[in-house]
Image (tube, rainbow, N blue to C red):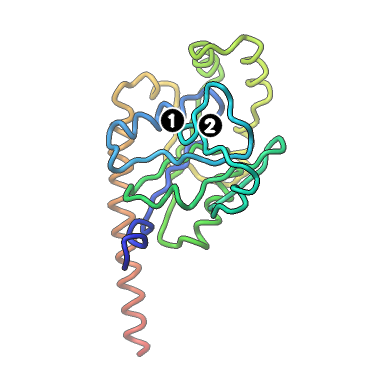
Amino acid sequence: MDSYDQRMMNKIVILIMGKSGCGKSTLERNLITVSSNRFKKVVSSTTRLIRPEESHGKDYYFLTDQEYDDTDFIQTTEFAGYRYGSSVAEYQTNHKFPILCVVPSSAKLFTETITERFPTWTTYNIWFNISDERIMANMRKRGDTEEMIENRISQDTLDQQFEESGLSSSMIVEDEDLDDKDFAKWAATELILFEHSWEIHQLSTVNWNDEKHRIHD
């Protein structure tokens, strides 16, 4: 097995979902701080124009339509006339836990895609069940205007999307978790425990399949 194949085996993709301003990016950064060897941010690609405060390769990979067409994506979606997706190249590292912040509809498509294309991978869904009051406070801290906050809160339907998606939550983050300075360490420990149990399950499945083949042979 070459190094490419080894890097692409047995990934546990962390799908972080929740309303705008709930703290998804903060958890993502904190997990990477806890263990940068295990956790990695998946930088998505888009065809929209770069904004003044954004950086290519940090916030997004800003691609032309032709560059986007030439890229191998795991999943891709369209919003407001622009395309967004996470490329296969973003997963070609030794990190066990790629982290992707997504909306529930994209998470469902991503899960279905990797089940078919990367059968040795699995997903770990983290859902932010945060109160609107806490989200509004977070938005004010980052400098959003009251008008922006009101519009985002009134238009955000991610709770409904998540319920309709049929996805299950591997971990639920609530208001009190955001006040715990050690929450990211606890979350990282939970993820590593999940990794161990999942690998045991994978090994048991392989051994059982081998035994079935031996019996039939």
In the displayed structure, does residue 111 sit left or right of residue 81? left
Q: Which residue is mark 2?
A: 18
Q: What's under tag 2, amino acid-wise?
A: Gly
User: Where's residue 106, x and y in %?
Assistant: 59, 44
Nearer the camera: disc 2 or disc 1: 2
Name the residue: 50% across, 59% down: 115
User: Where's residue 101, x and y in %?
Assistant: 49, 37
Q: Which residue is mark 1?
A: 173
* Above or below for 63 versus 116: above
- At mark 1, the secondary structure is strand
**Residues packed near mark 1 inside 10 Å, few (<14), some (14 to 19) or many (20 plus):** many
* Above or below for 23 versus 136: below
User: Where's residue 217, x and y in %?
Assistant: 35, 90
Mark 2 in CB contact with mark 1 (< 8 angstroms):
yes
- Lower position in the chain sequence, tag 2 or tag 1: 2
**Residues packed near mark 2 inside 10 Å, few (<14), some (14 to 19) or many (20 plus):** many
Q: What's under tag 1, amino acid-wise?
A: Val
Structural distance between the alpha carbons of marks 2 and 1 = 9 Å
Out of 43 and 139, give the one closest to the viewer: 43
